[in-house]
Amino acid sequence: MLEVVILGTGNVASHLFKAFSEKENIDVIQVYNHNKESLKSFSNLTNTTTNIQQLKKADFYFIAIKDDVIAEIAQQLNKYKGIILHTSGAVGINRLKHTANYGIFYPLQSFSRNTTIDFTEIPICIEANSAENLEKIKTLALTISKDVREVNSEQRKALHVAAVFINNFSNHLYAIGAEICNEHAVDFSILKPLISETASKIQTLSPYEAQTGPALRNDHKTIETHLAILSNKHKNLYREITQSIQDLHGKEL
């Protein structure tokens, strides 16, 4: 039985807790957070604590807390022999160097607390300070995911930036699209099949090959029509993305 302590109660921590708790060979023996209120949803499921000096002995300690306090939290765990892991995409492994055994366990996915996620489909990027620890982390990761990859800190940071573009930025564009629809009394839901088709295409085509639209066609009339419809706050963004598409595909406005 592998014993796990989770530090944090946010979205990533909550989904990890659920994924591990469903496995017979893993026991989440404790959840830590400095805020007692945030521990309420875990208190009937496992031991909880607000005192980081009272963590139980475990095989793995997951730091699933905001990036800017990872190093500070890790320094307080240097007395433990278990493997100290953080779950951030943007923080290097060296932030854990004050501990004896450490590594990375980065699930490459967007987590919302009330969304059901199949963890078996989530890529987990792992890294460690030794070959032995890497093997232990891999064994743990494979209990909840069928896609586990060794990725170093620089590669993981690049993946995180790429993920921001394809997830966070694209969602912001959905929000702008919804705003445009609302301004013109159109139901945004009419665009949902298009969103699904766009996401589906890159399962068989590269994003470069899947590109369509007036920017790719160098369709000046349509571009000018769109700019005329848009409010001033969206015109510059439209122009910049149009130019970016044309730069990538060797077109000229």
Image: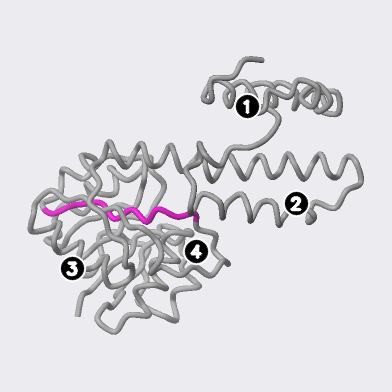
> Which quarter of the picture shows residue 91?
top left
How many angstroms separate mark 4 from mark 3 (CA)? 24 Å
Q: Which of marks 3 and 2 is nearer the N terminus?
A: 3
Task: Please tell me which residue lies in front, 109 or 113.
Answer: 109
Q: Which of marks 1 and 4 is nearer the N terminus?
A: 4
Q: Is mark 3 on a helix, strand or loop?
A: loop
* Residue pointed to by mark 4: 38
User: What residue type is disc 2 on?
Assistant: Leu
Q: What element carries label 1?
A: helix
Marks 4,3: beta carbons within 8 A:
no
User: What residue type is disc 4 on?
Assistant: Ser
Q: Is residue 113 above or below residue 239?
A: below
Q: Magenta region, mostly helix, strand or loop?
A: strand
Q: Is residue 115 above or below residue 110?
A: below
In this view, the mark in front (3 or 1): 1
* Residue pointed to by mark 1: 241
Instruction: From the viewer's perspective, tell me whether residue 89 is left or right of residue 130.
Output: right
Q: Earlier in the sequence, mark 4 or mark 2?
A: 4
Residue under the image location 51 percent in, 24 percent down: 248
Instruction: From the viewer's perspective, tell me whether residue 51 is left or right of residue 42.
Output: left
x, y percent for residue 118: 45, 70
In this view, the mark in front (1 or 4): 1
Q: Earlier in the sequence, mark 2 or mark 1?
A: 2
User: What residue type is disc 1 on?
Assistant: Ile
Which residue is most to the bottom? 24
Q: What stretch is highlighted in magenta?
A: 101-110
x, y percent for residue 251: 59, 19
x, y percent for residue 220: 76, 20
* Residue pointed to by mark 3: 59
